[in-house]
């Protein structure tokens, strides 16, 4: 067995924030995707934890997205898309998060097409609420991924696109979008820390 970066292939290796495997070649599709979504979860926690509601709502200019909006939006998109792909109810409605966060939008709103006034309307009583909602969505996501086989990724989940969207493409799209927005939130957090230092 060859080694990767000096780690023998059969040695226990941590491959991400949520998955440990005994062999590099033993990771399956469900573990790989759970690891990717776990990275999103970690980025969300790092962007939000310890910030005040005012800091979470801060916008670097009048048309910029706040950390609160970015994290709410990325979590809503993950919730919406994963629930739809697996035929389950969204955490947003099933677990009462729409009521708990009490944002002035329809329950179906994920933030797509939001303008500056919509972004300004996303305020939260605490960062813990945002993180708890994200954690609930993450838990449902990982539960749906459990037992996923490679052939499952070819299942068509959205025929409104040309070509139709497979489960694999949808899940990769969600993680890519989530990580982009989490990175934006981290950037805003960094700007906030420079202002207060």
Image (cartoon, helix red, strand yellow):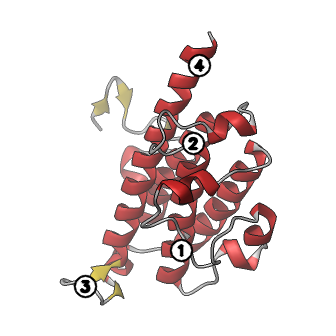
Q: Mark 1 points at which residue?
A: 80
Q: Are marks 4 and 2 in contact (CB under 8 Å)?
A: no
Going from N to C along the chain, the mark reached first, 3 or 1, is 1
The quarter of the picture where the N terminus appears is top left
Going from N to C along the chain, the mark reached first, 4 or 1, is 1
C-alpha separation, residue under disc 3 versus residue under disc 1: 18 Å
Q: Compared with residue 51, is residue 133 higher up or lower down, i.e. above or below?
A: below
Q: Compared with residue 11, is residue 75 higher up or lower down, i.e. above or below?
A: below
Q: What element carries label 3?
A: loop
Q: Residues within 10 Å of mark 4 (few under 14, many from 20)?
A: few
Label drawn at residue 164: 3
Q: Residue 32, how many percent across, how many down?
A: 43, 56
Going from N to C along the chain, the mark reached first, 4 or 3, is 3
C-alpha separation, residue under disc 1 versus residue under disc 2: 20 Å
Q: How crowded is mark 3: few (under 14 residues within 10 Å), some or many (20 or more)?
A: few
The quarter of the picture where the C terminus appears is top right
Q: Could you say which quadrant of the image residue 5 lies in?
A: top left
C-alpha separation, residue under disc 3 versus residue under disc 2: 32 Å
Q: Look at the image and tell me whether residue 42 can be seen.
A: yes
C-alpha separation, residue under disc 4 versus residue under disc 3: 43 Å
Mark 4 vs mark 1, foreground winner is: 4
Going from N to C along the chain, the mark reached first, 1 or 2, is 2
Label drawn at residue 105: none
Q: Name the residue under label 2.
A: 67
Mark 3 vs mark 1, foreground winner is: 1
Q: Are marks 3 and 2 in contact (CB under 8 Å)?
A: no
Label drawn at residue 193: 4
Q: Residue at x 58, y 79 (%)?
A: 108
Q: Residue at x 68, y 72 (%)?
A: 92
Q: Residue 112, how many percent across, how many down?
A: 44, 67
């Amino acid at each position: 067995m060859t080694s990767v970066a000096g780690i023998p292939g059969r040695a226990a290796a941590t491959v991400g924030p949520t998955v440990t495997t005994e062999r590099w070649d033993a990771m399956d599709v469900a573990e790989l995707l759970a690891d990717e979504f776990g990275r999103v979860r970690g980025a969300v926690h790092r962007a939000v934890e310890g910030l005040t509601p005012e800091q979470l709502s801060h916008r670097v200019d009048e048309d910029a997205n706040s950390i609160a909006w970015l994290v709410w939006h990325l979590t809503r998109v993950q919730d919406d898309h994963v629930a739809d792909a697996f035929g389950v109810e969204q955490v947003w409605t099933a677990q009462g998060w729409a009521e708990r966060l009490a944002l002035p939008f329809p329950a179906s709103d994920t933030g797509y097409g939001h303008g500056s006034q919509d972004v300004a309307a996303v305020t939260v009583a605490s960062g813990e609420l945002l993180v708890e909602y994200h954690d609930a969505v993450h838990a449902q996501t990982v539960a749906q991924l459990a037992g996923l086989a490679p052939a499952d990724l070819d299942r068509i989940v959205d025929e409104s696109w040309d070509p139709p969207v497979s489960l694999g493409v949808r899940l990769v799209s969600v993680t890519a979008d989530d990580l982009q927005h989490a990175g934006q939130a981290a950037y805003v957090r960094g700007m906030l820390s420079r202002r207060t230092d």
